[in-house]
Image (cartoon, rainbow, N blue to C red):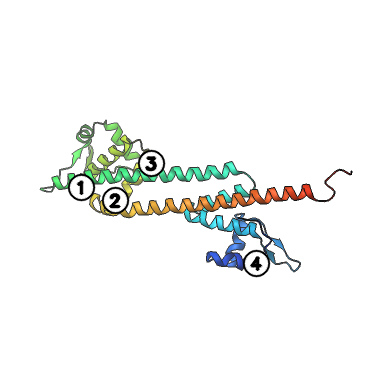
Amino acid sequence: MKPQTAVYRPVDLARPHGLSAQAVRNYEAAGAIPPATRTASGYRSYTDDHAGALTAYVALVRGYGSQPAGEIMKSVLRDDLPSALAVVDAAHVLLHRDRETLDQVAAAAVVLASESTSSASGPDPSVSVGVLARRLGVTPATLRKWERAGILAPARSRTARVYSPEDVRDAELAHLLRRGGYLLHHIAAVIKQVHAAGGAGPLAASIEQWRERITARGRAMLTGSARLADYLSYRELTRDDAAASATDSPGQHPAG
């Protein structure tokens, strides 16, 4: 991105991104792009610096979300690149974790679907906490801990917890994810996804759509990172040019 001396109005910056002029002013007020200069009559005046910042910010929003994108740009504009890159790194870690979760859920869906097929002759009876604990190879205390984390919600008789076939399915999925190293609050979110899909069968059918969303997010993050890199290169180039101009300007050299 070669430095230029072009001057833009808010609408000029907004139009290529399908934004309104007010949106550009809002982004400026939020600190996502540098402050504008003002003309003698008080109108905002933007430069290629603002255009590059807006391009980076819009791409970052699409990939990382508005809050992380704002944090990244604010850090860049105050020359705090390590903080900006820390936000980028954290987002990629989360994306990787989501991809791993999807793989685990896909594997679990296959297992649960096969178990549903094998038990098609009739539903399994409800079981006690002791029976379920022995089936999974865990302690009853572990199952109660999963219940407190929102993973399981067994019914209760007057004397004990009673786990339905759906509870057993949830426990088996939780056990699989726990062996994969997932934290309890993360497993609870996966179980919620199973319930929202209506069970293991519908969940398996929706996994490909889930995978497509993760892939699209990953590509958008790559684009956002590329636009951010372009803007960082522009800032470095303009900074170097400004330093060279200051060195070459009259009055900067000792008298001969």
Name the residue furthest right.
256
Instruction: Indicate which disc, 4 or 2, sits on the residue closer to the N terminus.
Output: 4
Q: CA distance from mark 3 to mark 4?
A: 48 Å
Q: Which mark is residue 113?
A: 1
User: What residue is disc 2 on?
Assistant: 195
Residue 52: percent from the left, percent from the top? Answer: 60, 57
User: What residue is disc 4 on?
Assistant: 9
Q: Dot 3: within a 10 Å radius of its alpha carbon, few (fewer than 14), some, or many (20 or more) residues?
A: few
Residue 67: percent from the left, percent from the top? Answer: 52, 52
Amino acid carrying label 1: it is Ala
Q: CA distance from mark 4 to mark 2?
A: 50 Å
Instruction: Indicate which disc, 1 or 3, sits on the residue closer to the N terminus.
Output: 1
Q: CA distance from mark 1 to mark 4?
A: 59 Å
Q: For the residues carrying marks 1 and 4, which lies nearer the camera in this image?
A: 4
Snapshot quadrant of residue 26 = bottom right
Amino acid carrying label 3: it is His
Amino acid carrying label 4: it is Arg
Amino acid carrying label 2: it is His
- In contact (CB < 8 Å): disc 2 and disc 1: no
**Residue at 65% across / 67% down in the picture?**
9
Q: Secondary structure at mark 4?
A: loop
